[in-house]
Amino acid sequence: AMEPTIVQAMVPEGVECRIGIHRHQALGDLITLGPGGAVAEQVANEAMQLLPLTDADADRLLDRAQLGELVDAEGAGARPALVDVLRRVAALAEAVPEIVTLRLNPILVVDGAAAITDVRIAVAPHTPDSRPPVRRL
């Protein structure tokens, strides 16, 4: 019998980041950004932002997480690539309320691109909240 095999492209070393989505009962939906990889849980400088996320919010989130300079050093397209991932993850969280938590760790930012190497998603049945939305643009 054949053994299952995973084949994927190798990603060179770069800046390791992590992105998370959390559903907070009192505050609303949050997106987080911080350093990624093996030391991610030991580093406390994770930045948070309420959803929905604008381009300006995503750009500021990068700087609040103290990743801006590191990402900018990876090439001209690196910051826009990571901002694009942030915006897409935020849009996914808003479109799929069954997602309870989502964690991308690590995301490797290298050569002007962002490569997602691991994703964990927890889902549950959605129960609509009868309260008015926390924040809407």
Image: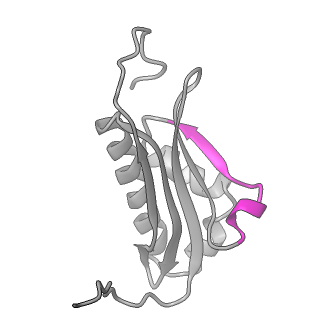
Q: Which residue occupies 77% across, 55% down? A: 44
Name the residue at the left extreme.
1
Horizontal and vertical percent position of residue 59: 52, 53
**Location of residue 90 by image quarter:** top left
| Residue 24 position (above or below residue 44) | above
| Residue 65 position (above or below residue 9) | above
Q: Quadrant of the C terminus?
A: top left
Q: Which residue occupies 53% across, 51% down? A: 20
Start-end of magenta stretch? 39-50
In the image, 111: left or right of 1? right
- Residue closer to the observer: 52 or 55: 52
Q: How is the image coloured?
A: one colour
Task: Count the labels in the image.
Answer: 0
Horizontal and vertical percent position of residue 110: 49, 82
| 49 inside magenta stretch | yes
Name the residue at the front extreme.
1
**Location of residue 129 by image quarter:** top left
- Residue closer to the observer: 65 or 98: 98
Horizontal and vertical percent position of residue 77: 42, 74
Horizontal and vertical percent position of residue 66: 70, 61
Q: In which quarter of the image is the N terminus?
A: bottom left
| Residue 110 position (above or below residue 31) | below
| Residue 60 position (above or below residue 4) | above
Q: Which residue occupies 44% across, 87% down? A: 11
| 21 inside magenta stretch | no
